[in-house]
Each structure stands twice: as structure tokens, then as C-alpha cells.
């Protein structure tokens, strides 16, 4: 038994790993798609899986519904990704000629934006590898487990359970480490199981340079991004003590003032939770004329049911997201009106 398999403890279950292993053995052309507005876990998982497939002799392409944030472009293979926003025809052709389509780090077709239709093309073998809650019915191999920290962790487990760990390389392990690091907030949440650290420890043996990855993700931000964070906290954060809530609403003009690039607001939503007494944090942003709400909470205060009940969204208990059909200001107004309902959902 290899080092990583010692920690997987049947997650994912053997039948899923077997089916995945059979698909890898069958080869063919694969396309891997992440969710819109991809984060470290989505990009790390897509590229990590792509490296693993390459080692198996499988031709795979990562096709993004929209732009990869700059801070993730250090990951090996990121220069080979196809951005649908930049190369729509190449992206569609890649998906059309694929035998296998992987939904990576999302579970509903509408989470991959403009790729919703191509990602759902009939007649394709589909695989979902994801850790978000409440996956809808899926036409394909569903490897969906909410108990893992990240889709990257799930891929490490899947590869080990499928007896394919010999395909793991330094490039793959490093990409997968990125998602484990970012989706746990630097090992702060969603990773309390001892087995998790055993798994990470085993992954490190492939030569992952943790310090270099930390540096790439945290210490290479643009001046605009750091100033936008400062502006959001100093000028835009509204604390509503009776609801233990912080709301930050940033419209497009405010974001552009700081030369906004995709990914620049990543992480801002977590910062108000540092304030004593704040248990909920909401960040409302505007991107491509769409209003997005990021939701975070501490402890037994679910935000996912709030996201799905009152907005078009969902996610994890303490980390959810939603779309809003209203503009930023009106979304903030509606959100604040709904705060009494939020408190009713407390356990
Ligand atoms: Mn994730």
C-alpha cells in the first residue's frame, strides 16, 4: 500500500475509483473544465489532473469559461489552458472532439458560465470531481464528496484509491497542493481530520516547495489589489452589530479605480471575520455586469441555506456564493433587509 492510500480510508469509495481507473485506462481525449471565476482549487485541480493524465499518455486540455487570475499563472501548465473568452472557437472545438469531459470543482452546469452548453454536450462520457454540497442529478461518473477540504485533496485521494499514484509527478503534486492550501485558507479550516495532514505530508514527499507556493500566492500581488483591499476595509465595510454582520459592497467604478483584475477581490470577504463579534461577512462585487455575493461565516452559522433560499446560490456551511439580479447597491439593500432571516437559520 502506498503512503497516500494509507490515509484515504475509502474516500472516495472503491467503485468510484475503479470506474475512474477504467476510464483512464481507456484513454481518449479529455477536456477538464473548472467553474467560472476560477480560484486556486479550481485551477490547481484542473492542472493537477491534467498532469496526471499526461503521465498516463492521455491528451487533455483545460478549458476555462473565463480568465485565470494572474496570481495562479505560476502553476506549471497554466500557459496551455484555453480561455473561452479569448479563444471561443478553439475552446468549443476542443470540447466537441473530447471523449471525456471532466467537471472540476463544480457540480451544476450553470456554474461553468458560457460553457454550460458545451460542457453538457450529449454523447460524451462525463466525470464530476467536486466537493460542493447538494450536487444535482448528473449524467456521468459522479465523484462528489463534501467531506474533503478541496477538489485538489479529492483528486489526490482518487488517484491513490485508483492505484494510479505512480502517475503523480512534482508538477501534479505542486498544482494540487495549491488548491489544498487555498481552499483551507492556509490550513485554517475544513481540515481538522488527522488523516488530512497525513495525506498532505505524503503529497509533500513528491518534492512540493511549500514556501515557494506560499510566496507565489501571497507575496506577488499587484499594488492595486492591496490598495483595493485597504479601500474595501477602510471605506466600504459596514458593521451591523445586531446581526453580527459585515457587508462590503464594491461597484465596478470603485474596483476599476484600483485597476481591478480578476481574482483581486479574492480573500477580502474573510477579513471582517477577524473583528470580535463579527460572525458573518458578505462581499458584493460587480463583474461583467453581473452582481456576485460572497458569503462567509464562523461556527454553526450556515450561509449556504441563506444563499440558496434568498439568492441564486449555495455552497458550504461557512463559505458560499450567490448571484444577484440586482445592481450592487440594491443587492446590499436587499441583503441587509434579509438579515433577520439569516439569524433564524442559526443552529
Ligand atoms: Mn474548491
Image (spheres, rainbow, N blue to C red):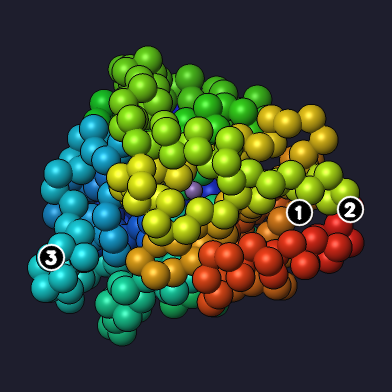
How crowded pointer 2 is (Cα within 10 Å; few <14, some 14-19, many 20+) is rated as few
Q: Position of residue 87 (x, y in %)?
A: 12, 65
Q: Nearer the viewer, residue 1 or 312?
A: 312
Disc tally is 3
Q: Which residue is mark 1?
A: 302
Give the residue at the far bottom of this rendering: 122
The residue at which mark 2 appears reads as 347
* Tag of residue 87: 3
- Whether residue 13 is visible, yes or no, is no
Q: Earlier in the sequence, mark 2 or mark 3?
A: 3
3D distance between C-alphas at marks 2 and 1: 8 Å
User: From the viewer's perspective, is 273 left or right of 4?
Assistant: right
* Residues under numbered marks 2 and 1 in contact, where contact means CB atoms less than 8 Å apart: yes
Kindly state the secondary structure of the residue where label 3 is placed: loop
Of label 2 and label 1, which has the lower sequence position? 1
Who comes first in sequence, dot 3 or dot 1? 3
Indicate the position of residue 49 as horizontal and vertical percent values. 31, 46
- Image point (49%, 75%), residue name: 138
* x 65%, y 25%: residue: 194
Q: Secondary structure at mark 1?
A: loop
Amino acid at each position: 500500500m502506498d503512503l497516500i492510500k494509507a490515509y484515504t480510508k475509502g474516500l472516495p469509495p472503491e467503485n468510484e475509483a475503479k470506474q475512474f481507473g477504467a476510464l483512464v485506462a481507456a484513454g481518449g481525449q479529455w477536456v477538464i473544465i473548472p467553474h467560472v471565476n476560477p480560484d486556486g482549487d479550481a485551477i490547481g485541480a484542473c492542472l493537477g489532473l491534467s498532469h496526471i493524465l499526461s503521465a498516463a499518455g492521455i491528451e487533455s486540455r483545460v478549458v476555462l469559461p473565463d480568465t485565470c487570475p494572474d496570481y495562479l499563472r505560476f502553476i506549471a501548465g497554466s500557459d496551455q489552458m484555453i480561455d473561452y473568452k479569448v479563444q471561443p472557437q478553439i475552446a468549443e472545438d476542443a470540447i466537441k472532439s473530447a471523449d471525456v469531459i471532466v467537471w472540476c470543482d463544480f457540480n451544476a452546469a450553470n456554474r461553468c458560465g458560457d460553457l454550460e452548453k458545451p460542457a453538457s454536450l450529449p454523447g460524451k462520457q462525463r466525470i464530476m470531481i467536486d466537493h460542493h454540497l447538494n450536487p444535482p442529478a448528473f449524467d456521468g461518473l459522479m465523484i462528489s464528496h463534501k467531506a474533503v477540504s478541496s477538489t485538489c485533496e479529492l483528486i489526490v485521494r482518487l488517484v491513490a484509491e485508483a492505484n494510479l499514484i505512480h502517475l503523480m509527478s512534482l508538477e501534479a503534486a505542486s498544482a494540487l497542493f495549491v488548491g489544498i492550501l487555498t481552499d483551507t485558507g492556509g490550513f485554517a479550516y475544513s481540515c481538522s481530520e488527522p488523516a488530512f495532514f497525513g495525506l498532505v505530508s505524503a503529497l509533500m514527499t513528491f518534492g512540493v516547495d511549500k514556501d515557494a507556493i506560499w510566496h507565489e500566492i501571497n507575496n506577488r500581488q499587484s499594488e492595486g489589489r492591496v490598495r483595493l483591499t485597504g479601500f474595501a476595509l477602510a471605506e466600504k465595510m459596514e458593521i451591523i452589530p445586531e446581526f453580527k454582520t459585515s457587508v462590503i459592497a464594491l461597484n465596478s467604478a470603485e474596483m476599476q479605480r484600483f485597476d481591478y483584475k480578476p481574482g483581486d477581490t479574492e480573500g477580502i470577504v474573510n477579513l471582517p471575520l477577524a473583528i470580535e463579534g463579527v460572525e458573518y461577512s458578505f462581499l458584493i462585487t460587480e463583474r461583467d455586469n453581473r452582481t456576485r455575493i460572497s458569503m462567509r461565516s464562523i461556527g454553526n452559522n450556515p450561509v449556504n441555506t441563506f444563499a440558496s433560499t434568498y439568492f441564486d446560490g449555495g455552497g458550504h456551511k461557512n463559505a458560499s456564493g450567490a448571484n444577484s439580479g440586482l445592481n450592487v447597491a440594491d443587492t446590499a439593500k436587499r441583503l441587509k433587509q434579509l438579515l433577520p432571516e439569516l439569524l433564524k437559520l442559526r443552529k
